[in-house]
Amino acid sequence: MMKNFYEKVYDIVAQIPKGTVTTYGCIAMRLGNIRLSRLVGNALHANIDPVNIPCHRVVNREGKLAPMYVFGGIDAQKERLENEGVVVDGDKVDLKKYLWR
């Protein structure tokens, strides 16, 4: 059976190790097209299993957290990342230090 786009996104996000983040663009590139970044965001917004699909580990290309983080807002995303050892400065993560590719 062929997986749909959202399932492919979730498969990648499920692989992001604790203590790291990746970007919407990195996920889109893994799927073969950087232009799919916005659709990656749509998929994460529709995530029905945030325990097994840790979408809190996905940030934008500048390392900024998602202002519309669906599971409790930006403060919840920040808290979840910090609980995993990721330092969040304001609303931003240092991609040079924490980026998983």
Image (cartoon, rainbow, N blue to C red):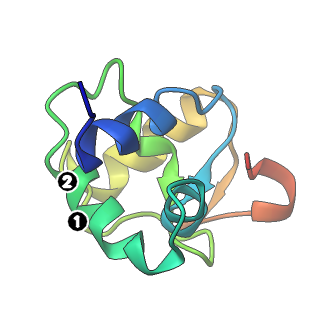
Q: Residue at x 51, y 43 (%)?
A: 57
**Residue 61 in view:** yes
Going by the picture, which residue comes out furthest to the right? Answer: 96
Mark seen at residue 27: none
Q: Up-down: is 94 above or below 19?
A: below
Name the element at disc 1.
Answer: loop
- Judging depth in this view, the residue of 28 and 86 nearest the camera is 28
Look at mark 1 in the image and give the residue it sits on: 68
State the quadrant of the N terminus.
Answer: top left
In the rendered structure, which disc, 1 or 2, sits on the residue that comes first in sequence?
Answer: 2
Q: Mark 2 — residue?
A: 45
13 sits to left or right of 95:
left
Where residue 21 appears, x then y in whole percent?
Answer: 62, 47
User: Which quarter of the figure has residue 48?
Assistant: top left
Whether residue 60 is situated above or below residue 71 in the rendered picture:
below
Please state which of residues 41 and 89 is positioned toward the viewer in this rendering: 41
Q: Residues within 10 Å of mark 2 (few under 14, many from 20)?
A: some
In front of the other: 82 or 45: 45
Residue 8: horizontal and vertical position, in percent? 37, 40
Residue type highlighted by circle 1: Met
Mark 1 neighbour class, 10 Å CA radius: few under 14, some 14 to 19, many 20 or more: few
Q: How many marks?
A: 2
Q: Secondary structure at mark 2?
A: helix
Q: Residue at x 28, y 67 (%)?
A: 39
